[in-house]
Image (cartoon, grey):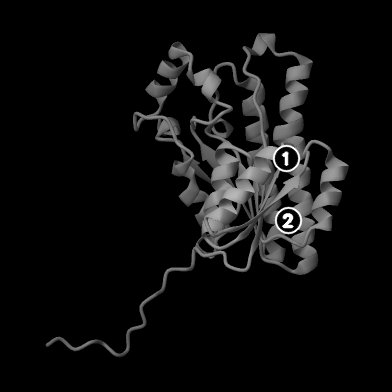
């Protein structure tokens, strides 16, 4: 019978659990935000689901609680910078942020209007920047070594037809995340981005119903299928947990091979 070594201590996988931690998810009423909230709650976090749509986030929080999780709704307009910052400051500090609220107004570059540009940049960049700032200030004050995750896009790494403003916003958030990572590292706060391919959500569904557009997308995704929100949940949990404790200023691409070439 083989003897068990007595001088070998096996390494242990860091925990993916989030028990006792608080997480804020913006744009949490549907799609990727709802999936993020569900994933974090399943791992034991108390999740605050934030969005403008009270009915959606209250229903989502109730469903999480019905499944045994801990969740509450916070009606929050991230584009209202000062009010959103005040609402976040009034909350107990968070251990994790999934900065997910965003939008898109596809148009050929030559047809983009100032209103389109301003609407996309205001939500995808300006609001995301200041929500993260408000959460980070709370983490610093409470001396919490937290995790901030920006939901970016594969379009923060490549270009795309009819996506000039969207690409601009996502390339910008990639740069912001890296600079944040440097500033916040002394406080033990990690900052990363999640970069999905086209995920079937209420926001993307109208575009994907166009057969020509859907065909173009499918040609780019090397794994041959559209993404589902469930495809992102493991990565979200990983990046918000101790399992990613040495990751900051990084991007995780869940793109089915789109950016591989």
* For residue 12, above or below residue 254: below
Q: Provide the residue designation for mark 2.
A: 183
Q: Quadrant of residue 157?
A: top right
Q: Is residue 58 above or below residue 22?
A: above
Q: Which residue is mark 1?
A: 54
When asked about the image quadrant of residue 92, the answer is bottom right
Q: Position of residue 134 (x, y in %)?
A: 79, 52
- Asked if residue 16 is positioned above or below residue 64 in the image, the reply reads below
Q: Is residue 169 above or below residue 90?
A: above
Q: Is residue 133 left or right of residue 223?
A: right
Instruction: Count residues near mark 1 (Cα–Cα under 10 Å), then give few for <14, some for 14-19, many for 20+.
Output: some
State the residue lying farthest toward the left.
1
On the rendered structure, is 19 left or right of 188?
A: left
Q: Is residue 210 visible?
A: yes
- Foreground: 147 or 182? 147
The x and y percentages for residue 42 are 52, 57
Res 246 visible: no
Tag 2 secondary structure = helix
Q: CA distance from mark 2 to mark 1?
A: 34 Å
Residue at horizontal 69 percent and vertical 43 percent from the top: 176
Q: Residue at x 75, y 56 (%)?
A: 136
Q: Label 2: few (<14), some or many (≥20) within 10 Å?
A: few
Q: Residue at x 55, y 50 (%)?
A: 38
Question: Residue at left 73%, top 56%?
Answer: 183
Q: Nearer the viewer, residue 71 or 224?
A: 71
Q: Nearer the viewer, mark 2 or mark 1?
A: 1
């Amino acid at each position: 019978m083989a003897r068990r070594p007595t001088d070998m201590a096996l390494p242990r996988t860091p925990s993916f659990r989030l028990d006792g931690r608080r997480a804020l998810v913006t744009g949490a009423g549907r799609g990727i935000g709802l999936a993020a909230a569900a994933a974090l709650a399943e791992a034991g976090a108390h999740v605050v689901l934030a969005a403008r749509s009270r009915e959606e986030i209250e229903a989502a929080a109730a469903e999480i609680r019905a499944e045994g999780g801990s969740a509450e709704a916070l009606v929050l307009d991230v584009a209202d910078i000062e009010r959103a910052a005040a609402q976040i400051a009034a909350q107990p500090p968070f251990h994790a942020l999934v900065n997910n609220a965003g939008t898109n107004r596809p148009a050929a570059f030559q047809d983009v209007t100032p209103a389109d540009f301003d609407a996309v940049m205001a939500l995808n960049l300006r609001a995301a920047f200041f929500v993260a700032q408000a959460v980070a200030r709370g983490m610093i004050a409470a001396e919490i070594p937290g995790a901030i995750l920006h939901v970016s896009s594969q379009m923060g790494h490549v270009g795309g037809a009819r996506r000039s403003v969207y690409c601009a916003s996502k390339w910008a958030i990639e740069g912001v995340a890296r600079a944040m990572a440097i500033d916040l590292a002394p406080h033990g706060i990690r900052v990363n981005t999640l970069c999905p391919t086209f995920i079937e959500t209420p926001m993307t569904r109208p575009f994907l119903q166009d057969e020509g557009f859907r065909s173009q997308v499918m040609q780019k995704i090397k794994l041959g299928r559209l993404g589902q929100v469930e495809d992102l949940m493991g990565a979200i949990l990983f990046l918000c947990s101790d399992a990613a404790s040495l990751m900051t200023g990084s991007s995780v691409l869940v793109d089915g091979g789109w950016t591989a070439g």
